[in-house]
Image: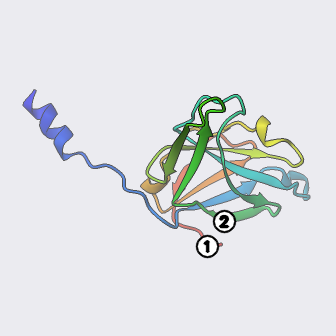
Amino acid sequence: MSFLFGALGCSSTVQPRADVTLLITNGTCETGQCAPVQILGFPSNQPHTPGGFWSVDLGLVSAPTACLTLPLSATFRVINASTGATTTYTWTTAEGLSLGALQPPASRIQATPSTGEFVPASAPGWRVTLPAGAQVSPRQACSS
């Protein structure tokens, strides 16, 4: 038992990290033409709202590849219409994030994550193919 507590006491937590990058491969470019793809991040701390998933707009990718920089943090506010009470949800790069993609003009309400969850601050950069990819892999930072 003491070994378990000792191991837990030595474990470290990931701290939020600025300038984490995401190398996107546009999976629509197979025929030589690339369709624009809106890249969205879906924080792990999703509130239950009738308006769909909370997402962070990461950028529009129209080229075969693009390097996007993740924001250090994002907030989402839920306002109770009957009481006016506001609940604020905050996400940082030290917390889980899943990715998804929309092809304009699709509504953001239809957006859902398509990748597994990863913790952005645990690596300087990440890579994924969207809209079809499901695996986000760590890598060195890319430059935009």
Q: Residue at x 80, y 52 (%)?
A: 37
Q: Nearer the viewer, residue 27 or 96?
A: 96
- What's the CA distance linking mark 1 and mark 2? 6 Å
Which quadrant holds the C terminus? bottom right
Residue type at mark 2 is Cys
Q: Residue furthest front?
A: 83
Q: Residue at x 48, y 65 (%)?
A: 18
Q: Position of residue 13 (x, y in %)?
A: 32, 49
Q: Position of residue 97 (x, y in %)?
A: 55, 45
Give the mark count. Answer: 2
Secondary structure at numbered mark 2 = strand
Give me the disc on residue 143. Answer: 1
Q: Position of residue 141 (x, y in %)?
A: 54, 67
Mark 2 = which residue? 67
Q: Earlier in the sequence, mark 1 or mark 2?
A: 2
Which quadrant holds the N terminus? top left
Q: Nearer the viewer, residue 70 or 52?
A: 52
Considering only vertical position in the picture, is 31 above or below 109?
Answer: below
Query: As drawn, is 141 to the left or to the right of 26?
Result: left
Q: Residue at x 49, y 43 (%)?
A: 96
Q: Residues within 10 Å of mark 2 (few under 14, many from 20)?
A: some
**Circles 1, 2 touching at the beta carbon (< 8 Å):** yes
Q: Is residue 117 visible?
A: no
